[in-house]
Amino acid sequence: MRRALVVLLLALAATGFIASPAGALGVLTWINPTTCADGTPLGTGTCTALTGIDVYCATTSPTMTGQTVSGTGLVSKSLGVVTTYTVVPTLITTAGTWFCAATAVDSTGQSVLSNVMSFPVAPTDPAPPTNLTAQ
C-alpha cells in the first residue's frame, strides 16, 4: 500500500518574474516536507526519505488521479531534493497563462499535488534580421 508523503508546501511562492535580456524567468520556490502524512519524520521507520520533487505545469490547472498528473499542454520535470526551480524558459517555452504544482517523491511513490500557482508568461520578441543589404 502506498504511503503518502505530507503534501508539499509548495507555497509556490512564485518568486514572480524577473526581467532579463532573454525574457521573463519564472522561478518557483517551495518548502519541502519533513514528515509523512501520518506525522512520522522522513527517514524514520517506514517513512522513507525524500528523494526528489516533480514539477508539473500546464495551461489548465494540473489535476491528479492516482499517481497520474494531467492538464492541457502538461510539461513536467523531475528534480532532486531542491527548493527552487526556474520554469521559464527551461520547462515552459510558450506564452500564455500557466499553472504549476508539484509533488514530493520518495522510494514508494509521490505525494498528492501541492497547491497550484498561476502566472502569465509574456511572449518574447524575435531576434532582429541580420545581414541586411541594399540592391
Image (cartoon, grey):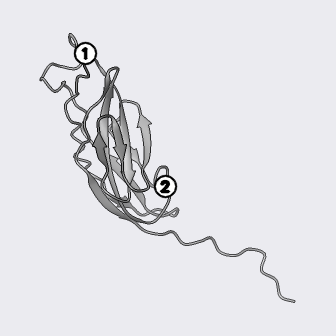
Task: Report the Cα–Cα distance between label 2 and label 1.
Answer: 34 Å
Q: Residue furthest top?
A: 45
**Tag 1 residue:** 43
What amino acid is found at the position of numbered circle 2 in the picture? Pro
User: Which quarter of the rendering shows the N terminus?
Assistant: top left
What amino acid is found at the position of numbered circle 1 in the picture? Gly
**Tag 2 residue:** 89
Residue 104 in the image: x percent, y percent? 30, 33
Which is more toward the observer, 75 or 23?
75
Q: Residues within 10 Å of mark 2 (few under 14, many from 20)?
A: some
**Secondary structure under badge 2?**
loop
**Secondary structure under badge 1?**
loop
Residue 86 in the image: x percent, y percent? 41, 48
Is residue 98 left or right of 113 when viewed as pictured?
Answer: right
Which is more toward the observer, 105 or 66?
66
Residue 10's quadrant in the figure? top left
User: Which quarter of the rendering shows the C terminus?
Assistant: bottom right
- Mark earlier in primary sequence (2, 1): 1
Which is more toward the observer, 65 or 81?
65
Tell me which residue sits at (45%, 66%) in the image: 95
